[in-house]
Image (tube, rainbow, N blue to C red):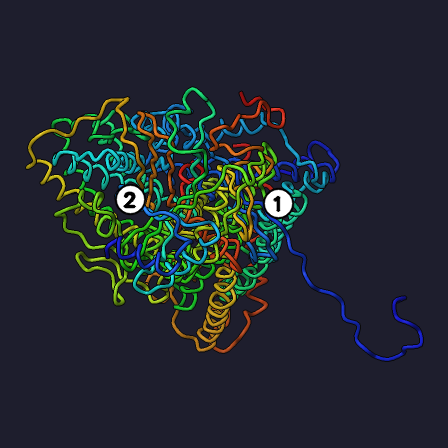
């Protein structure tokens, strides 16, 4: 009481400063739900996070620098290690980009083979995305259910190319090998047994009321913000932007899906495509929130199943070869080109500059997750700590692709 | 929409800020002067029938051959290029912008060439410019937060430059 | 037995008391430690089965039943780490505080008639109160760890546990009110007979109250979907992030101990305790186990113990099932669930049960015609009197009568426990 001068004998209430202090918390790079080695610096006031600053680069392996010293076919294994959960799609993106530079058309059979593989990879990748998202929200079991099915896809891939994670299968000029005999039957058998499993996932997560509580109306991203940040894939479509490179991309890429029937999974005029029976959108969910991003991913799994089935038919009908990989040190024409493909996590772009030698002058990988992650600080402002895994998980990032 | 049409519109509007046009390349590109870049970008972004509202990628390319023996093979004179790949979600069309820069500002080794930032037009540019700054060493003026993004903050040099030498040691860790 | 020691061997009564207390304590410790070992193994098996895998299969021959023991040995051998900035003393004692709270509440938990560490007449109150102290260990751990994640975990735990004590307490009071006693042994024995005598089926309000109790119990022992204090996807490991080795395992033991405790408490209060669904003892021995003596008593009690354990383990298994199925709630949702749902519901159930009894509406024991065999033959059945037709409280006389006969029929509690220990 010594602070009160003695002559002021009034009854004024002395106000004490009860403002709480802010705290800086390091989330990652070793943290269970930052999907690898992402580091988020949170400025928190109690449970409320006022600011999130992502720090990247813990998995930077100089892929682009290495690419300046290898031929495109030699660089294929390095693309595997970008999005290691969708290595086939990375291979495909780079192979298509190089083929575009060389103006090399792959045979019909190789085209359908690539669709089969790319869409199977999409299923596998979304399964991890789904399972890991469950894990982020504290539900452990869906993760293992997802991995159980993914294992079967990996088994199929292993049969096709001998590897289970980093395939280097699709390559410049086609694929390194044809699908082994009996593979298509196994693939179809897998799809048949997989379809009912999707409904189980919906029951466990998509329509679970706790799950909806945790991610509906959380991390809402309006469409214009998603476009401005260069988001892509399920993150973009979850915000209601009707863009899928398989339909809208460059001709060099869309040719691959020429003749395939599929609807882009996006909410148009208030509803999602109704080609199949999907669980209803809960009233709590707002377009662009975590739930919608997750939902788009889940619906894409169903869509991929359809695409694989179509591709299997076409592949069986097509004659000719699965494509011959170009020579390891094939000379590249001088010039430069950029091609984006629709990888499971979004638009994966490759940029190649060639001076006419077999080794490109410069290669550049435009990562989808890199752009998708850049919205984190915007989406996580003034949320709760528990929402951070929910938001970051819904972006479905792979650090290997972000840091390259 | 034909590229020719677009290019003539740009040339009519911006005149001397459009330095070069290459329409017969695989991906047609337009070279823009560094000072004119924000203006051109804003125009491309806002114009309703162009609406390049999606910035796919920003890449820095170093055209420099340190080995004099191989230098003959080099494409063009030593320079830095910053390449912007634009895309329009509305019109599903694409465009490539290029900005050519000296490798060092005023040919003084160590001082980075300047390009105005476009982060205020596309938010994507924020991180992409940081990455180009980090790896290729280009200074984006007016960028809100130009820091290294992939390399550690105290890293020295710009790894994607052709004359880059890996440091011998980084905080006591042997590098090569 | 203590009488035997004092009279025949001439030991000091104080020494004998201390000996007996230690015996009881070590028995309960055995229950917790053994229980944790079994439950951790069970958790892994249950999780394995739920997740389409096998769980441990190797250690100890079949089913990996020694896996937990092997893990325990590994934990013992681990380095005992302490973060540099941690408060050394608090950091060290926190796991023991948590464990002791869990352990302490077992003292008043009866496992069968008379088989109880300390037979106190306010056992319900004691168990709930002491269990609530576990939160101190968690808060201390979080505070002393000098880790921000731990601090978050501790703060969450504090908010959550303190909130959930309210509806939990309200739900616990409901059976107490029906029985008219806080003595857990008596509450259980009053539910003897057919399963319709269980307070779960007493009336619709009590039925709902059990599920509210179970939800609140999940929350107060930090089990999923309320495991916010250690939410691994948010807080790394919450309050025990910085702990390793044996200290960490003490938290684990406390957690599983508490899980068992709330399940056991729930099954005594609502599920008839050690009384099976059919009045078996009455058929075989002609009267309830608590009225027996000698060998028959032991046999009946062992049977009751099995029934009691099965019920508690079933409740624990459901907890595991829930944990491996549901996502986790957010802290604000957890607190909302407590204050907006659990508390009002349990309050309504509380009022409902009061009125049900005041109005003298038929209760579960009236459903089956054989109920005379069960409850009404109990020594000094309080049921008739408790809030019966025209009186609000049981007659004092009948209570005294009951306790007198109770004493006659039963050996002293300490005897019972130690007998079991020797056999």
In percent of width and height, residue C273 lies at 45, 52
In percent of width and height, residue B43 lies at 39, 61
Q: Residue furthest right?
A: A7
Circle on res. C98: 1
Give the residue number, with chain letter if any, for mark 2. B27
**Viewer-proximal residue, A300 or C117?**
A300
Q: Residue furthest bottom?
A: A10
Residue C203 seen from this side: yes
Q: Residue furthest front?
A: B16
The numbered mark 2 sits on a residue in which chain?
Answer: B
**Viewer-proximal residue, A290 or C99?**
A290
Dot 2 crowding, Cα within 10 Å, few <14, some 14–19, many 20+:
some
Splitting the image into 4 quarters, where does residue A399 fall?
top left
Kindly state the secondary structure of the residue where label 1 is placed: helix
Kindly state the secondary structure of the residue where label 2 is placed: loop
Circle on res. A171: none
Position of residue A150 in the picture relative to residue B42 (left or right): left
Residue C307 seen from this side: no
In percent of width and height, residue A391 lies at 44, 53
The residue depicted at 43 percent of the width and 60 percent of the height is A218
Q: CA distance from mark 2 to mark 1?
A: 67 Å
């Amino acid at each position: 009481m010594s602070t009160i001068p003695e002559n002021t004998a009034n009854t004024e209430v002395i106000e004490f400063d009860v403002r709480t202090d802010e705290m800086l918390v390091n989330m990652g790079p070793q943290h269970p739900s930052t999907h690898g080695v992402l580091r988020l610096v949170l400025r928190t006031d109690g449970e409320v996070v006022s600011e999130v600053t992502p720090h990247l680069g813990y998995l930077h392996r100089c892929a682009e620098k290495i690419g300046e010293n290898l031929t495109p076919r030699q660089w294929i294994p390095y693309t595997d290690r970008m999005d290691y959960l969708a290595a086939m799609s990375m291979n495909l993106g780079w192979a298509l980009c190089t083929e575009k530079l060389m103006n090399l058309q792959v045979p019909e059979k190789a085209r359908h083979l690539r669709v089969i593989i790319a869409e199977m990879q999409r299923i596998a990748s979304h399964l991890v995305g789904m399972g890991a998202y469950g894990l982020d929200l504290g539900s452990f079991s869906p993760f293992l259910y997802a991995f159980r099915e993914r294992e079967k896809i990996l088994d199929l891939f292993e049969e096709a190319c001998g590897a289970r994670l980093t395939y280097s299968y699709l390559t410049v000029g086609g694929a390194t090998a044809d699908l082994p005999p009996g593979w298509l039957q196994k693939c179809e058998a897998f799809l048949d047994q997989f379809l009912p499993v999707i409904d189980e996932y919906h029951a466990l997560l998509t329509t679970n009321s706790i799950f909806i509580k945790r991610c509906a109306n959380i991390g809402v991203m309006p469409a214009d913000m998603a476009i401005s940040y260069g988001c892509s894939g399920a993150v973009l479509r979850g915000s209601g932007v009707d863009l899928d490179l398989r339909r809208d991309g460059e001709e060099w890429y869309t040719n691959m899906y020429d003749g395939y029937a599929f609807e882009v999974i996006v909410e148009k005029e208030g509803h999602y495509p109704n080609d199949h029976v999907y669980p209803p959108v809960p009233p709590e969910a707002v377009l662009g929130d975590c739930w919608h991003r997750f939902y788009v991913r889940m619906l894409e799994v169903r869509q991929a199943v359809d695409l694989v089935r179509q591709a299997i038919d076409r592949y069986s009908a097509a004659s000719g070869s699965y494509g011959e990989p170009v020579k390891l040190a094939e000379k590249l024409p001088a010039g430069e080109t950029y091609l984006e493909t629709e990888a499971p996590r979004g638009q994966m772009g490759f940029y190649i500059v060639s001076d006419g030698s077999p080794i490109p002058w410069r290669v550049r990988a435009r990562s989808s997750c890199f752009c998708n992650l850049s919205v984190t600080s915007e989406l996580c402002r003034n949320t709760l700590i528990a929402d951070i895994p929910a938001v970051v998980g819904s972006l479905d990032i792979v650090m290997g692709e972000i840091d390259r | 929409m034909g590229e020719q049409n677009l290019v003539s519109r740009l040339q009519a509007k911006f005149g001397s800020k459009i330095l070069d046009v290459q329409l017969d390349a695989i991906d047609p590109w337009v070279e823009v002067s560094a000072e004119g870049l924000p203006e051109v970008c804003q125009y491309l972004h806002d114009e309703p029938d162009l609406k390049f509202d999606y910035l796919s990628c920003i890449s820095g390319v170093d055209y420099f051959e340190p080995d004099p023996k191989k230098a003959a093979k080099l494409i063009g004179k030593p320079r830095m290029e910053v390449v912007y790949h634009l895309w329009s979600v509305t019109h599903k069309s694409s465009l490539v912008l290029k900005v050519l820069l000296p490798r060092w500002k005023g040919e003084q080794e160590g001082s980075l060439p300047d390009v105005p930032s476009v982060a205020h037009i596309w938010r994507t540019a924020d991180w992409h410019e940081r990455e180009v700054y980090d790896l290729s060493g280009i200074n984006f003026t007016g960028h809100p937060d130009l820091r290294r993004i992939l390399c550690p903050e105290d890293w020295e040099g710009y790894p994607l430059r052709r004359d880059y030498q890996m440091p011998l040691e980084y905080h006591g860790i042997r590098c090569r | 037995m203590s009488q035997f020691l004092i009279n025949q061997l001439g030991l000091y009564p104080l020494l004998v008391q201390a000996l007996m207390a230690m015996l009881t304590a070590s028995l309960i410790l055995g229950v917790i430690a053994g229980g944790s070992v079994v439950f951790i193994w069970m958790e892994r098996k249950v999780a394995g089965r739920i997740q389409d895998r096998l769980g441990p299969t190797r250690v100890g021959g079949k089913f990996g039943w020694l896996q937990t023991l092997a893990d325990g040995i590994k934990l013992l051998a681990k380095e005992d780490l302490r973060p540099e900035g941690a408060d050394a003393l608090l950091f060290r004692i926190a796991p023991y505080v948590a464990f002791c709270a869990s352990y302490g509440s077992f003292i008043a938990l009866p496992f069968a008639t008379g088989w109880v560490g300390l037979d106190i007449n306010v056992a319900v109150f004691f168990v709930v109160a002491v269990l609530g102290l576990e939160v101190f260990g968690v808060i201390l751990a979080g505070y002393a760890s000098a880790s921000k994640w731990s601090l978050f975990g501790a703060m969450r735990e504090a908010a959550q546990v303190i909130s959930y004590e309210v509806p939990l307490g309200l739900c616990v009071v409901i059976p107490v009110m029906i029985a008219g006693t806080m003595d857990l042994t008596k509450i259980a024995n009053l539910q003897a007979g057919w399963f319709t005598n269980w307070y779960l089926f007493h009336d619709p309000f009590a039925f709902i109250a059990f599920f509210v109790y179970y939800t609140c119990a999940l929350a107060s022992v930090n089990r999923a979907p309320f495991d916010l204090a250690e939410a691994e996807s948010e807080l790394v490991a919450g309050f025990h992030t910085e702990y390793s080795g044996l200290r960490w395992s003490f938290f684990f033991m406390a957690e599983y101990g508490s899980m068992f405790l709330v399940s056991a408490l729930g099954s005594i209060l609502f599920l008839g305790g050690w009384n099976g669904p059919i009045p078996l003892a009455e058929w075989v021995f002609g009267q309830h186990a608590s009225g027996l003596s000698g060998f028959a008593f032991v046999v009946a009690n062992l049977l009751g113990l099995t029934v009691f354990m099965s019920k508690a383990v079933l409740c624990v298994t459901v907890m595991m099932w829930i944990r491996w199925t549901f996502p986790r709630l957010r802290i604000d949702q957890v607190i909302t669930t407590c204050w907006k749902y659990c508390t009002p519901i349990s309050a309504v159930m509380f009022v409902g049960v009061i009125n049900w009894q005041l109005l003298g509406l038929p209760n579960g024991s009236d459903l089956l015609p054989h109920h005379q065999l069960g409850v009404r033959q109990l020594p000094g059945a309080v049921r008739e009197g408790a809030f019966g037709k025209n009186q609000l409280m049981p007659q004092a006389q009948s209570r005294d009568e009951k306790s007198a006969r109770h004493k006659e029929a039963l050996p002293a509690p300490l005897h019972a426990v130690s007998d079991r220990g020797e056999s």
